[in-house]
Image (cartoon, helix red, strand yellow):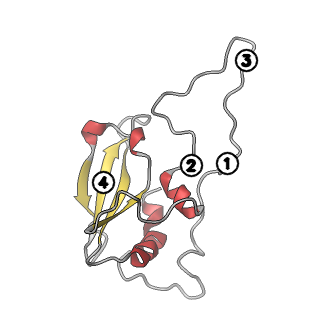
Amino acid sequence: RGWPPRQIEGRSPRASSTRAGGGGGEHPPSPTADGPAPRATARRSNGPEAYQKYESGLVDFFDISSSADKGRFRVHDAKLFKADTMHRKVDSATAQGGVTLLMGERIDKQGVEQVITVLFDRKIFEEDDAKVWWSYNRERFI
């Protein structure tokens, strides 16, 4: 998939996206006959993934930690990743450049590397352009 995105006849970029996860309504584990409920690990996220917060309208697309040069879009919570494995890599699938990926290995999934944050060069991507980019590329990262 390149940039700018090609319009698929009869479909808008957002129409083809599906929201992952079941959303709210999750309850903490219940106590069992064998004892208290199991505890979640301190680094485990019980809430929605970071990208789901944007897609649900809870947060703006560019994170508050964005700078004048780089717009940040959080895909996953960084607490779910091993800090010593985090690194940046240029997204080679974006033809005109301007997209850098913060990658890392998941704590809960041995050997699984995922995108944590997408960094957009603001000289190339205004926030609205980055939103369109996400709608066409989200399936690569979730």
Q: Earlier in the sequence, mark 3 or mark 2?
A: 3
Residue 15 is situated, as x and y percent measured from the top left of the image, at: 60, 75
The reply to whether callout 1 and callout 2 are in contact (CB within 8 Å) is yes
Disc 1 and disc 3: Cα gap in Å? 23 Å
Residue 90 position by quadrant: bottom left
User: In terms of depth relative to the viewer, which is nearer, 102 or 2?
Assistant: 102
Residue 14 position by quadrant: bottom right
Q: Which residue lies most toward the bottom here?
A: 9
Q: Earlier in the sequence, mark 1 or mark 3?
A: 1
Q: Return the residue at label 2.
A: 48
Residue 87 is situated, as x and y percent measured from the top left of the image, at: 24, 49
Amino acid type for the residue under numbered disc 2: Pro
Residue 67 is situated, as x and y percent measured from the top left of the image, at: 29, 63
Amino acid type for the residue under numbered disc 3: Thr
Disc 1 and disc 4: Cα gap in Å? 27 Å
User: In terms of depth relative to the viewer, which is nearer, 112 or 87?
Assistant: 87
Disc 3 and disc 2: Cα gap in Å? 26 Å
Disc 4 secondary structure class: strand
Q: Return the residue at label 1.
A: 24
The reply to whether callout 3 and callout 2 are in contact (CB within 8 Å) is no
Q: Return the residue at label 4.
A: 102
Q: Return the residue at label 3.
A: 32
Amino acid type for the residue under numbered disc 1: Gly
Q: Where is 41 relative to 134, above or below?
A: above
The reply to whether callout 4 and callout 3 are in contact (CB within 8 Å) is no
* Mark number displayed over residue 49: none
Residue 89 is situated, as x and y percent measured from the top left of the image, at: 24, 57
Q: Which residue lies most toward the right here?
A: 33
